[in-house]
Amino acid sequence: MADYLQRLTAAIDRELLVGIDPSRGTLEAAMHYAVSVSGKRLRPLLFLTLLDASGRKAERHIGLASALEIIHTYSLIHDDLPAMDNDDLRRGMPTVHRKFNEAVALLAGDTLLTYAFEKIAAAPLPAEKTVAIMGIVTRCIGKEGMALGQALDLEFRGDAGAISEIHRLKTAELIKGSLLAAAVVAGFSRRRQDLLARAGTALGLGFQLADDLLDVSGDEERVGKKLRKDGNNRSPNAVLHSSPQAVRAEIGRCHREARGWLAELGIDFAPFLFLAKSMLYRSQ
Amino acid sequence: MADYLQRLTAAIDRELLVGIDPSRGTLEAAMHYAVSVSGKRLRPLLFLTLLDASGRKAERHIGLASALEIIHTYSLIHDDLPAMDNDDLRRGMPTVHRKFNEAVALLAGDTLLTYAFEKIAAAPLPAEKTVAIMGIVTRCIGKEGMALGQALDLEFRGDAGAISEIHRLKTAELIKGSLLAAAVVAGFSRRRQDLLARAGTALGLGFQLADDLLDVSGDEERVGKKLRKDGNNRSPNAVLHSSPQAVRAEIGRCHREARGWLAELGIDFAPFLFLAKSMLYRSQ
């Protein structure tokens, strides 16, 4: 299984660079830098392993998989900007605005988002499926999805009750969207799509809680970004407003819930379940 | 004809606000503010009048028309940010980052771009046409289109030879894309699409030259933004690197070229030709 996941990850890493030529100028160099910096590739891996779990040829849809990672990358570039979270490190490397400058980082994020839609439009799928995926993805990352989550994060002033909604929007929506995109490719019924959406939301919430734990207790060098150990309760980090024990218990609940929905769907493909579990119980 | 164009403009203005509810929070309030500020609505008007010229029912495609204006609006919000052009006024009103703040303006731009693709995905068209339009639009505004134009603008250091390419990318590509989107809706042949692309590029170049003239000689109150009369040759303004006379002559050349392509296409619909002409010979 490790081989299988490594092979998929390598294919994603290759595909991410297709069509982006750093020698063409600063804009493409910044885009290339951002997608080259190694990441977990979680969203495309979930998408591809779910396709394999559904008996589809995953690698045929590597372009669509990479579009999901490109969207995630755009959101990280913009979230790291000085006007937002003002972060200097991401995945152990200088953030795009530190490596280049703010204007280039802003434009590289914009252009990666645009490029992701270009890749979705070019997917080798019946046009009806492509349009359905475009609708799902835009709703998951838009004004009632990921972008709203970032807006609420910026406005967060310590109300612990708001944290779960921020997590759902900012993190779980694109993870849900990645699973739903695979469901459309695989031709799942509406009912099965609904079950999968619930599993995706539970996994996404658990994943963000695991991130919150690492943000407070993790090892900066392994996590690869500046951690917030200062107990600043302006950050919507669940651990700062509850306890590591309570957060671990909640992660377990998310995992059980997701497994329940996946079992009902009949998805018992080992790599997919392994990924889902490793999202929640990780040390970096 | 004034009635006809006013009616279309009013329909665009109404459609731009559909689905954006400022009472839902700061993010949608900023999006709503940005699309409410009155503009020329040039791209959707070109799209709709071209559809009418081709015997299609333009108003059926008002959603797609508004998506073109929303993309234009996203690009203005981001170009106005302090890291880019640092402008305080746009269309006579405070820019989004001055009215709200930088983080909200950044997110509102991102979310408008996403929302434009959501609207394109929802267009009442055969899915093949929707996918074709997504491909065209993403290429026109992406790393080899509008976004590259903004990147080259940021790097501009006074090389007059680069101005025309910056204008083509930054301005003409989305205007070309708006015409091509109409061509797809109307079912134009590849050859007719190519002719229309040339007309769109010529019109877009002429439009940007007219903007450059106004930027140097216009009346700030009527134009509604800060004008650059200081002869700063770091700005890729054609007038600063040549003369108003030469720029006016070039605008005339663009107009004749566009009319030539349109005549070859057999497009003699008065409102479309009126719009095309008024883009190039305007005082605000």
Image (tube, coloured by chain):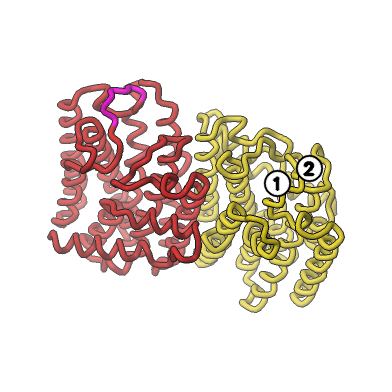
Chain colours: A red, B yellow
Q: Amino acid at mark 2?
A: Val
Side of B256 relative to B195 (left or right):
right
The image position of residue B275, as x and y in percent, is 79, 57
Q: Find the distance from the CA under tag 1 to the CA under tag 2.
A: 23 Å
- Indicate the quadrant containing the N terminus of chain B: top left, top right, bottom left or bottom right: bottom right
Q: SS for tag 1?
A: helix
Side of B161 relative to A222 (left or right):
right
Q: Is residue B51 visible?
A: no
Q: Residue at x 62, y 35 (%)?
A: B33
Residue A230 covered by magenta stretch: yes
Q: Quadrant of residue B243?
A: bottom right
Q: Residues within 10 Å of mark 1 (few under 14, many from 20)?
A: some
Q: Nearer the viewer, residue A181 or A89?
A: A89
Q: Nearer the viewer, residue B43 or B187?
A: B43
Q: Is residue B99 above or below residue A28?
A: above
Say which mark, if any, is on residue A29. Answer: none
Give the magenta-colored segment's residue range.
A228-234
Q: Residue at x 13, y 59 (%)?
A: A2
Subunit that carries the residue with mark 1? B
Residue A72 covered by magenta stretch: no
Q: SS for tag 2?
A: helix
Q: Residue at x 31, y 55 (%)?
A: A189
The image position of residue A155, as x and y in percent, is 44, 27
Dots 1 and 2: beta carbons under 8 Å? no
Say which mark, if any, is on residue B223. Answer: 2
Q: Residues within 10 Å of mark 2 (few under 14, many from 20)?
A: some
Q: Amino acid at mark 1?
A: Ala
Q: Residue at x 62, y 54 (%)?
A: B153
Side of A284 relative to A182 (left or right):
left
Q: Which residue is mark 1?
A: B11
The image position of residue A57, as x and y in percent, is 26, 68
